[in-house]
Image (spheres, grey):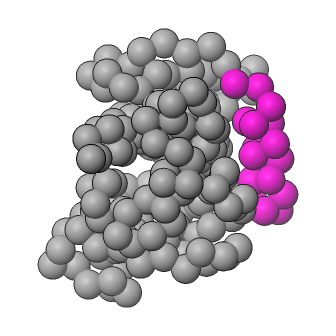
Amino acid sequence: MMRQFALAAVLCLALAPPASAPMAGFPAVTDASRTEANGERIISLSAVVPVPPAEVWEVLTTPEGWVAHLGVARAAIDLRIDGVIETSYDAAVALGSPGTIKNQIVAYVPGRLLAIRNIQAPDGFTHAEEFGRTVTVITLTPVDGGTRIDLQGVGFVPGAAFDALYGQFHAGDAWTLQQLHDGLTSRP
């Protein structure tokens, strides 16, 4: 069921990008987030970087890329369907421990799309079970002079837990895109 949901979400998101506006506090990020008729909120953020999609893909799918450009201290990646991206923002937290973040790869198209869902939040993370019911879809589109990175978060249904998660990840995903933009823009 989750795989069917994720694949349907990927198809819908790829077909109809909404209008967007700059996001306050994150100058490189545009925000087209919205609420659907059924009350589900969609995080919809994008940024353009001056490098080809292959370079962005390398960042998203290698431990070195996550450490260098996505603000994590440790990372391990098993790039395959049902593979896992495991990270920690704390260098003292060993990979494989309960303190790491594990995101399962739901779908991917090399160089173009990565869909993930959380299967392990760090100890003490509030609403971990609900967060595991959301999916993040990242698409890379070649544009003149670089790549447009679109990040979509789906599955934020009405309810207090999802309200809190939406607020946290709307800002957190914007921070991540800004970090990625800044790191790739400052490359020699």
Identify the main secondary structure in magenta: helix
The quarter of the picture where the N terminus appears is: bottom right
The structure residue drawn at horizontal position 25% and vertical position 41%, both measured from the top left corner, is 186
Identify the image quadrant of residue 37: top right
Residue 93 vertical placement versus 33 (above, below): below
| Apparent side of residue 180 relative to residue 34 in the rendered image (left or right) | left
| Residue 6 falls within the magenta-colored stretch | yes
| Residue 105 visible (yes or no) | yes
Question: Residue extending furthest left?
Answer: 92
Using the image as rendered, state which of residue 35 and residue 71 is in the foreground: 71
Residue 85 vertical placement versus 43 (above, below): below
The structure residue drawn at horizontal position 58% and vertical position 70%, both measured from the top left corner, is 104
Residue 127, position as x, y percentages in the image? 44, 55
Residue 26, position as x, y percentages in the image? 31, 26
What are the residue bounds of the magenta stretch? Answer: 1-17
Residue 50 vertical placement versus 110 (above, below): above
Residue 16 vertical placement versus 133 (above, below): above
| Apparent side of residue 34 relative to residue 63 in the rendered image (left or right) | right
Residue 57, position as x, y percentages in the image? 53, 57
Using the image as rendered, state which of residue 130 and residue 76 is in the foreground: 76
The structure residue drawn at horizontal position 62% and vertical position 67%, both measured from the top left corner, is 105
Residue 118, position as x, y percentages in the image? 53, 63
Identify the image quadrant of residue 168: top left
| Residue 120 visible (yes or no) | no
Identify the image quadrant of residue 49: top left
| Apparent side of residue 81 relative to residue 3 in the rendered image (left or right) | left
| Residue 104 falls within the magenta-colored stretch | no
